[in-house]
Image (tube, coloured by chain):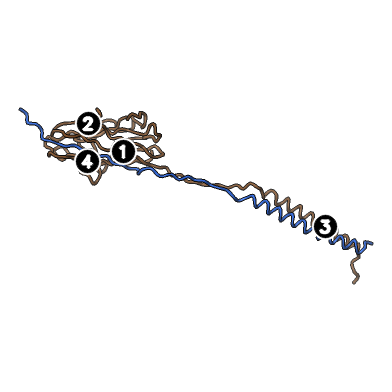
Amino acid sequence: MVSKNILAALIVAVIIISLTSTYTVLNSLKEEGDEAGTGTVKVEVIEQPGPPSSSGLAIVNVIEKPKGG
Amino acid sequence: MSEVSNKVLAVLVALAIIVSIGGTLMLLTKIKPTMTGAATGVAKVDVTAVVAISLPTSTVDFGTIYQGATDNTTDNSPGPLIIQNDGGVDVNVSIARDSNSSALFSGTGGGDNTVSFRFKIDNSTESNSFNYAASTTTWTNVPGVAGINNMLNELKYNDATDTAEVDLLIDVPNDEPIGSKNETLVFTATQS
């Protein structure tokens, strides 16, 4: 016949083990979660060069053709 | 109703311990494979191709010339227009008369798309800058606002080989009204 004291000790042990296990699980989950989910993406934006079109100019000054002799 | 014996209670308590430990171990085993310390993810960056050109030499001044005379830029007097690819991709370039500009000559044989005003593409000092065979490298009439597409083909973007010459030729009509004339040409680039 198990004594009342042993029974009480066993029940206390169950409580302690249960709490310890729960704490261990929660702590484990917390540590794993803290290490995940952070990161840095770096993008350098530079000034865009000129437009896709550009213009050029042709200039000429026309004078009267010399009269043939 | 008789009370449960202490022995039965002890067995139940022992069973509770086993179930508790077993459950915890099973839980940890179940969670471990899906939880890692290394987070993975995908960072997506869209880089848009930049199409850009400029004309380092943007003016050709033929100076004073007689009616009926002709001149061109192949002797570098005056020098030709220079087109430069300032973007990050190879480009094709079109040529057109600016809609805000008139044709260079208005005398007989003048106007858009006539032999009075012609162009052609040529190598600059930066040879192998473009696809010579696919470009307009023989004298061709300068078009009106409708333009000519891809007259300069696959102009590269690397600094060492990113320029081309646009030679110009004028053949002044005999009856061209005397005075100062000019025409603005628009060069537009698209990705090759």
Callout 2 secondary element? strand
Name which residue type carries label 4.
Answer: Glu
Q: Which mark is residue B188?
A: none
Looking at numbered disc 2 in the image, what kind of residue is underneath it?
Asn
Sequence-first disc among 4 and 2 = 2
Report the chain holding disc 3: B
Q: Are marks 3 and 1 in contact (CB under 8 Å)?
A: no
Confirm whether circles 4 and 3 share one chain: yes
Task: Name the residue at 75% across, 52% down.
Answer: B26
Q: Are marks 4 and 2 on the same chain?
A: yes
Q: As drawn, is B14 to the left or to the right of B24?
A: right
Determine which of the numbered discs, if any, sits on residue B72 in the image. 2
Give the residue number, with chain letter if any, for mark 1: B55
Where residue B91 appears, as percent x and y from the top left, is: 37, 38
Q: Which residue is mark 3?
A: B17
Q: CA distance from mark 1 to mark 4?
A: 15 Å
The front one of B150 and B17 is B17
Q: Chain of mark 1?
A: B
**Disc sitting over residue B183 in the figure:** 4
Q: Secondary structure at mark 3?
A: helix
Q: What colour is chain B? A: brown
